[in-house]
């Protein structure tokens, strides 16, 4: 079969076996290779799909890297995380899945060469907003896909006046942390109603292809060293790769019950705002691989960020002086500072300067779509990210802008379109002509989606000492399909974006 190896970074090339000067393909750091026969002291054959190419021996390595793919799911979030461990120790997680079918389509594309059934380690639905969880529905229904864990933020939407459950003294205490508790709530069809989120959780609860379905929070996880970790990713499991859970933050309500505080529509408002509350209690994950760190910011908003900074920076108390405020921010930074951040709420301007100062990454990923009414990402927010980010030129990467075109046109789809156009030209009956026009519109919409709407992705590859952030060129020049940036540590050990030499 040949040995499995991985491309070195940032990019390397595969060459024509008949002419070792002719480049045929460009690979990104961490792309896996099946090494074949030895050509000479400097070159080996490599299998890539059905073809055989040549690769320099110096251009591949044994070690894997941490891989993240921030997928263009339109308006919403979706990320695939592949851990750097080899063989059976490898774990693949999906953190949010958008609202449509892009994530499912990409998974089928990405894992097409693997066995008919594939088990992922975890699905994380950060909170019950449809542009984060709805895309999981068809994934959960697929008989080919299994999950060892499904994680959620404990807020179970339901039919009735209390969307997130009853509110007592400013707290939601009817959280459903365990599989048993969620099943007890959703066993009533009347409670589930026709809402999408109950349908998703109910699907997971009743499938034998799923392991545990549970809440992930500062209270619900693996506790170690005064922190909470995603189960299996604490320092004692693997000190080189950890996933800390920073939110939602469980507190004690006035009646003594554990719960989640409600958030209002603004800092001065009093009544609970359901959208702000479920968004503000997104599952917040901080991944650390050796020295490189990434934060998944969910859909945090101003009230939530205000609360989190005071919770982690000043034990919940508001600072009264500038000195106390500076001390609070510095203390919160010890928990939230990262090298890269999945930007909160798709580039909404509902953020605080304080939170951006606390995180201060060298690179941001904004996951947004163009068929929405929110104007995401907001222009003022993009300017603020550039101002608050680390270094002279922090990266602000948007899935909406950096999406890729597909490499080949769908010939079958184009053929169907041509036939429809020919029929339209000849059809005289008004009703039949209207039906043909509707069919044509559907195909044109599909052609558009397949050309620019799917498989656009922002790739992160890192060994924890260096990082590469890459995306596909929409129009490649020769075999150069990747555009990338490197992040390396400066003299103080801080990751900084490297200059692109004028490119």
Image (spheres, rainbow, N blue to C red):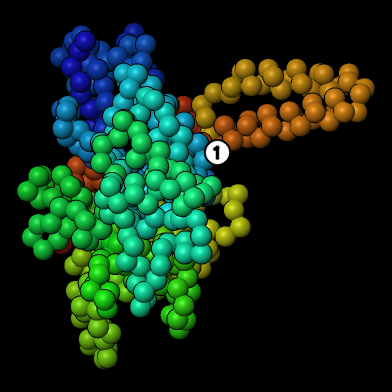
User: x, y (%) of residue 170?
Assistant: 37, 76
Number of numbered discs overlaid on the protein picture: 1
Q: Position of residue 28 (x, y in %)?
A: 32, 33
Could you say which is closer to the camera, residue 193 or residue 355?
193
What is the crowding at mark 1: few (fewer than 14 residues within 10 Å), some, or many (at least 20)? many
Relative placement, left or right, of 142 versus 337 is right
Tag 1 residue? 453
The residue nearer to you, when weighing 500 against 349, is 349
Q: Residue at x 68, y 29 (%)?
A: 443
Q: Residue 183, percent across and down?
A: 34, 46
Depth check, front residue: 49 or 11:
49
Q: Is residue 419 left or right of residue 111?
A: right
| Residue 171 x %, y % | 34, 72
Taking 454 as reference, is 428 left or right? Answer: right
Question: Is residue 132 among what the camera can see?
Answer: yes
Q: In this rendering, is residue 438 above or below 230?
A: above
At 51% from the left and 26% from the top, the residue drawn is 407
Give the quadrant of residue 147: top left
Q: Is residue 154 left or right of residue 66?
A: right
Give the residue displayed 41% in from the left and 63% down from the top. Answer: 165
Looking at the image, the residue that sits furthest to the bottom is 321
Quadrant in the picture for residue 359? bottom left
Res. 31 visible in picture: no
Above or below 94: residue 320: below
Residue lying at 25% horizontally and 67% vertically, measured from the top left? 258
Residue 7, compared with residue 273, is above or below; it is above
């Amino acid at each position: 079969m040949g040995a499995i190896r991985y491309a070195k970074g940032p990019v390397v090339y595969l060459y024509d076996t008949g002419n070792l000067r002719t480049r045929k393909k460009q690979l990104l750091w961490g792309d896996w290779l099946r090494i074949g026969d030895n050509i000479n002291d400097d070159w080996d054959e490599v299998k890539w799909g059905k073809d055989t190419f040549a690769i320099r021996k110096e251009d591949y390595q044994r070690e894997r890297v941490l891989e993240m793919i921030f997928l263009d799911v339109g308006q919403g979030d979706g990320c695939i995380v592949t851990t750097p461990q080899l063989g059976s120790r490898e774990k693949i997680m999906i953190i949010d899945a958008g609202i449509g079918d892009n994530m499912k389509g990409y998974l089928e594309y990405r894992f097409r060469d693997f066995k008919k059934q594939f088990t992922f380690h975890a699905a994380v639905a950060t909170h019950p907003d449809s542009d984060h969880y709805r895309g999981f529905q068809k994934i959960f229904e697929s008989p080919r896909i299994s999950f060892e864990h499904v994680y959620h933020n404990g807020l179970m939407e339901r039919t009735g006046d209390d969307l997130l459950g009853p509110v007592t003294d400013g707290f939601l205490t009817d959280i459903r942390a365990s599989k048993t508790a969620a099943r007890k709530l959703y066993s009533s069809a009347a409670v589930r109603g026709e809402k999408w989120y109950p349908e998703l959780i109910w699907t997971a609860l009743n499938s034998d292809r799923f392991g545990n379905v549970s809440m992930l929070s500062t209270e619900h996880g693996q506790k170690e060293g005064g922190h909470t970790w995603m189960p299996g990713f604490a320092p004692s499991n693997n000190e080189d790769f950890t996933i800390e859970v920073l939110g939602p933050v469980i507190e004690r309500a006035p009646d003594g019950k554990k719960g989640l505080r409600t958030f209002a529509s603004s800092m001065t408002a009093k009544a609970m705002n359901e959208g702000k509350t479920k968004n503000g209690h997104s599952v917040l994950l901080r991944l650390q691989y050796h020295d490189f760190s990434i934060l998944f910011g969910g859909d945090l908003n101003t009230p939530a960020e205000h609360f989190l900074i005071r919770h982690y920076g000043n034990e919940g108390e508001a600072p009264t002086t500038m000195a106390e405020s500076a001390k609070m921010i510095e203390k919160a930074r010890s928990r939230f500072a990262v090298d890269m951040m999945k930007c909160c709420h798709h580039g909404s301007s509902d953020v605080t300067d304080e939170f951006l100062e606390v995180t201060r990454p060298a690179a941001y990923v904004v996951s947004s779509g163009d068929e929405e009414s929110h104007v995401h990402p907001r222009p003022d927010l993009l300017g603020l990210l550039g101002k608050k980010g680390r270094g002279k030129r922090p990266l602000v990467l948007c899935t909406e802008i950096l999406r890729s075109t597909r490499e080949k046109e769908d010939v079958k789809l184009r053929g169907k379109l041509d036939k429809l156009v020919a029929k339209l030209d000849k059809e005289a009956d008004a009703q039949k002509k209207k039906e043909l026009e509707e069919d044509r519109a559907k195909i044109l919409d599909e052609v558009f989606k397949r050309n620019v709407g799917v498989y656009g992705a922002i790739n992160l590859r890192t060994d924890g000492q260096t990082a590469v952030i890459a995306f596909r060129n929409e129009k490649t020049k020769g075999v150069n399909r990747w555009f990338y940036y490197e992040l390396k540590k400066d003299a103080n050990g801080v990751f900084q974006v490297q200059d692109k030499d004028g490119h």
